[in-house]
Image (cartoon, rainbow, N blue to C red):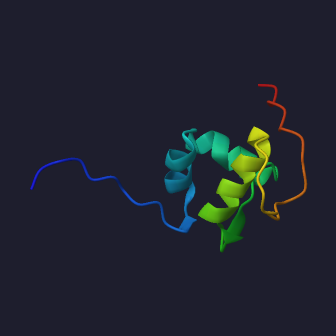
Amino acid sequence: MSGSVQPVAREVMDIRQASEYLGISGDTLYRYASEGFIPAFKLGNRWRFKKTLLDAWMVEKSGVQTSSVVAVMPRQKKPIARAR
């Protein structure tokens, strides 16, 4: 049996899985999570991301109007790049 197998996104993802799902680097995602820009929570000392919350966050940020109401974290400004 040949062909490509697409990995299924889990409901709760770690930094690596979520960054692949969102198409951004792990460093950027870590910064967004620690600054509260993206919905995330800590389990122990590691960041975790719920797929449904990420999907709702992306819909909100894209400006697409949906017919159903989705509860998402309050709006926050995009983090400013730190001076190096």
Q: Is residue 48 visible?
A: no
Residue 79 placement (x, y as % from top left): 83, 38
Establish if 20 lies above or below 40: above
Q: In the image as oriented, which residue stretches furthest toward the left?
A: 1
Towards the viewer: 29 or 4: 4
Residue 72 placement (x, y as % from top left): 81, 60
- Left or right placement of residue 17 versus residue 5 in this view: right
Q: Residue at x 82, y 53 (%)?
A: 36
Q: Residue at x 78, y 57 (%)?
A: 67
Towards the viewer: 76 or 3: 3
- Left or right placement of residue 30 versus residue 12 in this view: right
Q: Is residue 26 visible?
A: yes
Residue 65 placement (x, y as % from top left): 79, 47
Towards the viewer: 75 or 82: 75
Residue 13 appears in which quarter of the rendering?
bottom right
Establish if 38 lies above or below 70: above
Q: Residue at x 23, y 47 (%)?
A: 4
Residue 7 placement (x, y as % from top left): 36, 56
Q: Quadrant of the N terminus?
A: bottom left
Establish if 12 lies above or below 22: below
Residue 74 appears in which quarter of the rendering?
bottom right
